[in-house]
Amino acid sequence: MARRSPLINVMVSAVMKASKGLRRDFGEVEQLQVSRKGPADFVSIADKRVEKLLFEELHTARPDFGFLMEEHGAVAGKRDDIRFIIDPLDGTTNFLHGIPHFSITVAVEERGEITAGVIYAPFADELYWAEKGAGAFMNDTRLRVSGRSKLDNSVLATGIPFLGKDGHELFLAELTEIAPQVAGIRRFGAATLDLAYVASGRFDGFWESGLKAWDVAAGVLLVREAGGYVTDYKGRQNVQEAGTIIAANDRLHAPLDRMLKRVRRNVNS
């Protein structure tokens, strides 16, 4: 059995406790009170309940840590060099439509670097976790990115800009460039799980723009600890601040990056 550090145990305990309420709310999704943050960007009572519980549990266990949360933003801690990054419900639209593909996510950022991450998919009962230098795991199984080296037998994942978001023209150009060269492209609606699937070898690569730190923080560490390579669209490592991401195994990252660069040059020319 893989050994978890005290910090990972704290994070896992909080996430598992929060998942119980999320399961209950999912069963009553039609009765949930839903408000809108923007077009096609929903937040439910479930998001807020989970975030509150995670904050309380993690703050009790690590009172010096700061927080960055999707719903309530940044909360300063006694230490300014370390914080939890929380996404209480990634895949909110899936959740609200009764699609059981969503996750709860917590990461730890120290001096700008992600050093620990947990992603839990309640209905698959898959707990992904990683610590810097200690590997990546799903439940107790060690993860490794896929070994595929050719695009024509690879399956990639991405996100599609939805109502109210910019970038539709660019995305369609990316799809036109990439789709004919790969075995398939998937859009499942939860970036955290897309990255977890890259780490586990289910997907061979993933790209998306318009993301926030809580969407990618834990997943970036998972992919890297599973032997993958992650950058933003400009080749930088600190992707949680960039809003763009390319994640793949070490053989497919470069060709995927080249295709995306080619598309941007053509669109911008």
Image: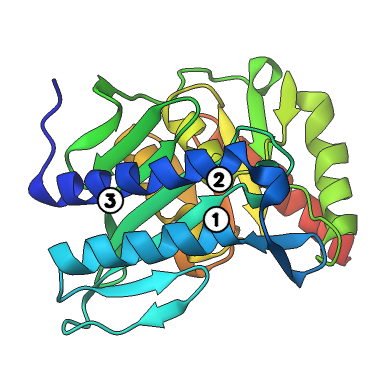
Residue at 40% across / 72% down in the picture? 68
Q: Position of residue 186 (x, y in %)?
A: 71, 30
Residue 20, image quadrant: top left
- Specify which label sits upstream in the sequence, 3 or 2: 3
Is 255 rendered above or below residue 268?
A: above
Q: Which residue is mark 1?
A: 46
Residue 178 is labelled as none
Quarter of the view holding residue 126: top left
Left or right for 206, reference 13:
right
| Residue 112 in sight here | yes
Pointers 2 and 1 in contact (C-beta within 8 Å):
yes
Location of residue 128 in the rendering, given as x and y in whole percent from the top left corner:
35, 35
- Identify the disc placed on residue 25: 2
Mark 2 falls on what kind of element?
helix
Q: Mark 3 highlights which residue?
A: 14
Of circles 3 and 2, the one toward us is 2
Q: Mark 1: which secondary structure?
A: helix
**Residue 204: % across, % down:** 56, 27
